Image (cartoon, grey):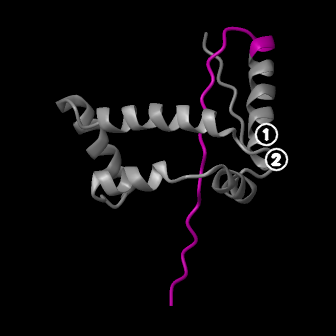
């Protein structure tokens, strides 16, 4: 029997033009992740986010380039394709309690930070 544990990853990319702003950005990101673990998102804020998510989700099917990017990412990540309307309903059913529960499970203190500087 083969047991395979999947790794979940959250990737956040920040672009800054100086070290001070990079440090402030890191603090802001960790602060927001901490808030997700300790506070419920207000219903009106979650509704606003869901509306933006729905717009972005639907737009991935609107033109050839968006479709190509979506299907290539799906292929690379080996994501299982679901019926789009069913998948969207699943995302839109998320509650503030769900967000705190998942945040507590996955947003732990461990992180990898890469500072990449260009010349």
Compared to residue 77, the image places residue 10 above or below, namely: above
Compared to residue 31, the image places residue 38 above or below, namely: below
- Contact flag, marks 2 and 1 (Cβ < 8 Å): yes
Is 64 a magenta residue? no
Q: Residue at x 45, y 36 (%)?
A: 53
Q: For this rendering, which residue is in front, 110 or 95?
A: 95
Is 13 a magenta residue? yes
Q: Residue at x 69, y 41 (%)?
A: 41
Secondary structure state at the residue bearing disc 2: helix
Of helix, strand and loop, which mostly describes the magenta segment?
Answer: loop
Q: Measured from the top left, where is residue 24 in percent x and y? A: 80, 19
Residue at the far front in the pictured view: 44
The magenta span reads 1-21
Q: Measured from the top left, where is residue 90 in percent x and y? A: 44, 56
Give the Cα separation between the discs numbered 2 and 1.
5 Å
Secondary structure state at the residue bearing disc 1: helix
Q: Which residue is mark 2?
A: 38
Q: Measured from the top left, where is residue 101 in percent x and y? A: 70, 58
Q: Going by the image, does 105 lie left or right of 63?
A: right
């Amino acid at each position: 029997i083969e047991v395979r544990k999947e790794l979940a990853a959250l990737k956040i990319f920040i672009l800054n033009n100086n070290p001070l702003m990079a440090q402030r950005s890191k603090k802001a990101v960790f602060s927001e992740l901490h808030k997700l673990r300790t506070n419920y998102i207000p219903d009106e804020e979650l509704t606003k986010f869901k509306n933006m998510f729905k717009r972005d989700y639907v737009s991935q099917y609107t033109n050839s380039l968006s479709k190509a990017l979506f299907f290539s990412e799906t292929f690379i990540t080996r994501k299982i394709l679901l019926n789009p309307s069913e998948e969207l309903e699943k995302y839109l059913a998320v509650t503030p309690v769900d967000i705190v529960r998942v945040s507590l499970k996955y947003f732990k203190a461990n992180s990898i930070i890469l500072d990449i500087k260009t010349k």
